[in-house]
Amino acid sequence: MISEKSFASYLVAPSIIVLLLTTTFPILYLIWSSFQNINLAMPWMDGFAGLKNYSDMFQDKQFWKSFKLTIIYTLSTVSLQLIIGLGLALMVLRIPKAQWMFRLMAILPIVLAPVVVGLFWRTLMLAPDFGIVDFFTKTIGVGSFAWLSEPKLAVISVIAIHTWQWTPFAFLVLLASLASLPTDLYEAAKIDKASAIKRFFYITLPLIRPAIVIIVIIRSMIALSAYAAIYAATRGGPGTATEILNLFAYRTSFLEVNFGYGSTLAVFILFITITVAAILYSIRKKRI
Amino acid sequence: MSFIKFNKKNYRNFIITFVATFILLIWILPLIWSVFVSLKSEIEVLAYPPNIFFEPVLDNFKAAIFGSLSIISELIDSFIIATITTTLTLILSIPAAYSLARLNLFGKKKIGFYVLATQMIPPMGLVIPYYLILGKFGWLDTYHGMIIVYMTFSLPFAIWLMVSFMEDIPREMEEAAFLDKASRIKTLLYIIIPQVKGGIAVTTIFTFMNSWNEFLFAVQLSGNKVRPVTIAMYNFVSVEQTLWAKLCAAALIAMVPVIIIGLIGNNHIVKGLTLGAVKGGGRK
Amino acid sequence: MKKIINRKRRKFLKQSMLTGLAISSFPSILTFSSDALAAAYGANINWRQAEGSEITVGLIPAGYFKNLEAIKSTFEDLTGVKLNIEMTPPGEIRNKAMLDFSKKTGIWATNATDPMFYYLYEANGWVDRLDEYLENPKLTDKKWFDYNDIQAGWRGTTSVKGIPYGIPFDGEATCQIYRKDLYAKAGIKPAETLDEYLSNAQKIHDPNNRLWGAAVRGMKGAGQNMYIYPSILAGYGGKWFNSSGKMTVDTPEANAALDYYVKLQKTVAPSGVSNWNWPDLADAFGQGTLGSYIDANSTASVINDSTKSTVVGKIGYARWPKGPSGKRVCSIWNWSFPINAALNKKDKIATWLFIQWATSKETQAATSYAFSGAYKRVGVNRNSIWKNNEFQSLMSNMGDNFVDTSIKSYNEDTDADWRPRTAQWPAVGGEMATAIQAALVGEKSIKDALKDAQAKIDKIMMG
């Protein structure tokens, strides 16, 4: 039979070709744009800008504010998704009979269109004096909160909305992963009288590490690029309190039609995403 | 002795089931509320305190399916695009994932990272380049145009999901197959793939969903002849007002195809799990 | 199946449309021939000179455009031009239009255009001068089309340096909208001044019974809170450009105006108002939880919709309150149609025929009081129609003083420079919107918000 190396190459080649064809030009275009002055509102200024966009960016207060917010947002939502998803998966694992129902219910938040999610949370759930969450908080006596109008609360709200929508992903992937783990390792551990917690940390966790890392990478990417739900819920407001880098780049590129600078922001997002992924990628391979 | 043990286990399972169900119910509360809203008349939707008891009407669903605001043709468009995208993605990604996960591929690490990195370009940075490319070929507002664009982010995503599932299978699988004189292809098709059926189902669902719910490219790169369902939602969000009840009805209808795919996939997940259990996870 | 439904629907609507035409005192029409239609339209031009073309028009989902879409087969039968209408989400249509314009892909022959963007479009050469079309007797029957019948203020906004680049189709003006029953009970009249407006609201403000006195747009956006603030600024005598032509936004008048805005919203509006856009205002008013609001007169159709609103018959309208400077300036807004400069000649003619048809007296009537569906357009573009008896009687159903308030607002309270008309409007409008909301939610003080906005705008205007 053919060598493993050749076989492996044939299997992977079509995908690589497709990706090369479809992503090379866009990346190059984006990088090129970031070195240009492209502002539709001032076409007379168009031309090569060199590093000016980048130096502007690093001096832009709004950029740093947005960057900090993005880090907080991404770390919070990915951690929450992982913890809640893992917890739920571990619980549901023990009830094989009802699993299908949980899986079905879990899919529902993800299937709902992001735009509808944002609008829904904005008007029907979180609106003070009009929304359901407000109704509950009043009923249980803690009063009313301006969930989306108060800067700090707004950040919590959008983290909650994003986590709400995407934890099921972590849940489903971890569930599938956990379910396929070989059971004999557990038998051996039980015979050795290892406690449940020890079993979890020393056997389960290392084995599902690849799944966890992938979830973290993918969810981080989505968190960094998610825009539809936040936009529908707050438009990056109040003020700029919930304007993560991604929204800021969108506003610059499309609403303020400053494509050059917007591309610079986009390249920056790309850069940190790749860096984060590279770090995670290198630790995924360490096996016990 | 065994009697008491039995009760203990049952009791614990019961608690776990209860807690899990409670959490999940809260989780889908907004969706339950959507169902309520879709059955109300518009005037009641914004009533406060919110009504739980009311007379349900089917007008909103009728409006979303029949009549001038119908979303049926958009559903069909989205279905075509999502199905073809998912199928092509699976065909390409499963072998690629196998190669990256379990074979001795030349430049494995670099290729693996490249695949991952292609997904990281912020979508809004891609709108203009894609608009230019598709425009040049005359592929704007076409099915194949949208499919190509969606493949770009489905493919890396699917590859990496499948890689993690592929890595769960014990290493000895291939060796056992080769002892039986199976070719490489046969090993992949008949030994490996059945083992990751559950993973394939999960990947299918999410790939399908990514295409289904996509909005940014859908609106900029198509919209007239090819009109995905995410744009159709705006039939009910006009400049003047949002028709909440009809919007919820439409959103719920739009979720149906994905749920169906999810249910079908679910079967395979279950089959995959029982297979794994029978084989004892690969060991004798 | 879609085609069959469409055909059936078109046939029905075509009949309604022609019936509508008949009602609006044109000779009754028994055939559907193109000649008959041409006769009904009465223009002395060859409507079929672009026969065989196909054009796509980008519109947003809105009642006034949906009515136009409903009768589009009339246009197709009249001219032999195939018309595709693409309903695009309102948040995306500008991006899509600009993408199309800037890359010269010529996908949209025309689209529903925001008047504040004409300076930008003209600077980039994306749209054609329309005076050449208006003055060409082969393309336009000047007497029949009667360009000057269109609202003067609106025509001003779609022109750059006096040259028209778009023709207004549908427009609106902001005004006070109030619950006349609540006002009567409290013994108050609609406010003449801004201070009176606030005190009126305080008199009926009753949050414990879920009634808030007043509210205006709080959501940030160049077309959102920056649609109300400029009127307040004008009321305080503020201007956008100083005497040397520099854009200044942190003047004393601006501070006073923003102060009033924040005071109003914080005192008598619901606490979530910083996220509210006009549909939220109209919904709250319709549900009876808002005593009054200042926004577009076109929201009248929403609050008079008995399937959604509980306050039909209790509505009154009044002009914008005057500010301390004695001025009152309402919004000036319309959706208009330009011609995409990237099209070929025949398609441009087809597009012009469409624009002429859509903005003509006949079509405006047919989509408004003569329309067979439930929604009748309020924001027609022609003075002559506003004077039409049938239109007036229909509009007076919207509430007390609707017609009078609208006409006076259009004719006396508009100012084309009520918002800064410049090619950099998108960025400038966005910065101001952010500043206003930041002040409203307390993220910054009023002074700081305006100062920061000024700094950013200086950079933007410098280029």
Image (cartoon, coloured by chain):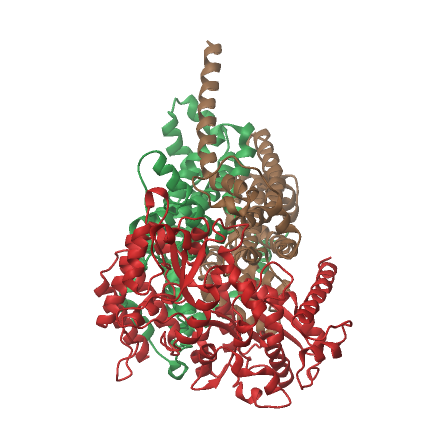
Q: Quadrant of residue C257?
A: bottom left
Please tell me which residue is depicted at 47% across the width and 42% down the height of the picture. B30
State the residue at coordinates (57%, 83%): C146
Side (left or right) of C260 relative to A31:
left
Q: Position of residue B25 (x, y in %)?
A: 47, 34
Q: Position of residue A121 (x, y in %)?
A: 43, 48
The answer to whether B32 appears left or right of C218 in the picture is right
| On-image quarter of the C terminus of chain A | top left
Q: Nearer the viewer, residue A97 or C352?
A: C352
Q: Nearer the viewer, residue B20 or B273?
A: B20
Chain ID, red in image: C
Colour green, chain? A
Residue A166 showing in the rendered view: no
The residue shown at (27%, 70%) is C236
- Give left or right: position of C46 versus A227: right
Picture layout, residue C412 above or below residue B144 = below
**x and y percentages locating residue C35 in the rendered image:** 75, 79
Residue at the (40%, 81%) spot, across then down: A46
Q: Residue furthest top?
A: B1
Q: Report if residue B259 is visible in the image.
A: yes
* Closest to the observer, A2 or A135: A135
Letter of the chain in brown:
B
* Count of numbered circles on the image: 0
Q: Toward the viewer: C418 or A216? A: C418
